Structures are given as C-alpha cells and as structure tokens.
Image (spheres, rainbow, N blue to C red):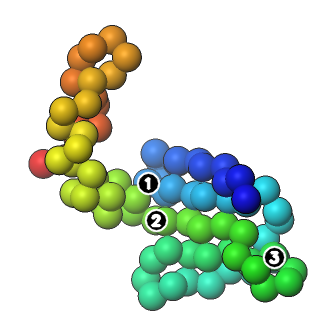
Amino acid sequence: MKLDVSCYEETDTLSFWDREPAQSADDIADNPLVNYNANGEAVGYTLDHAAEILLPILQPALKSRKDPTGKPSKLAKSSS
C-alpha cells in the first residue's frame, strides 16, 4: 500500500491516505480520525493538532537536523 501524506499548517492537521476514496470515518478516542472505504477497510488517517502532539516527541531528533542550506531546521526551533 502506498500512502499519500498531507500536512495542513493552517489547521495543524496531518493526513495519511491510501488513494482509495473514503466512505465513512470514526474517531479513535479523541484523535486520530480513521477513514474507511465501502468495504470497511481503513484507507486513511487524520491527526488533528499534529504539531502539538508530534513535536514534543520529535524535538530531540530535530535539534540536530539542518535544512538544505545548512541552517538549523525551523522545526527544531518551533516548540518551546
């Protein structure tokens, strides 16, 4: 399965999609949202408040990353 990944900064949403259309969706606890096809198979996942949830987990690894110009990554500086 190949997944498309989309990040929407304006809504702080991260989506992973198998290119199949979704017919329904359910929340798993408070987050994420799981999208299902007509056969009830999961075809996508949407994580709201993605930066709030993921940056604290990823921050240690991001601190040492550089952007393509050699400057520290913007992500490494974005959480406090």
Q: Is residue 69 visible?
A: yes
- Report which residue position mark 2 lands on: 48
**Given the image, on which type of amino acid does mark 3 rest?**
Asn
Q: Which mark is residue 37?
A: 3
Q: Nearer the viewer, mark 2 or mark 3?
A: 3
- Kindly report the distance in space between the C-alpha atoms of the residues bearing marks 2 and 3: 20 Å
Q: Residue furthest right?
A: 38
**Given the image, on which type of amino acid does mark 2 rest?**
Asp
Question: Going 83% across and 65% down the picture, which residue do you hit?
Answer: 21
Q: Which mark is residue 80?
A: none
From what the image shows, is residue 7 above or below residue 40?
above
**Given the image, on which type of amino acid does mark 1 rest?**
Asp
Question: Going 37% across and 17% down the picture, which residue do you hit?
Answer: 68
Q: Residues within 10 Å of mark 3 (few under 14, many from 20)?
A: some
The foreground one among 45 and 79 is 45
Q: Residues within 10 Å of mark 2 (few under 14, many from 20)?
A: some
- Report which residue position mark 1 lands on: 12
Query: Residue 54 at what x, y percent from top left?
Result: 33, 58
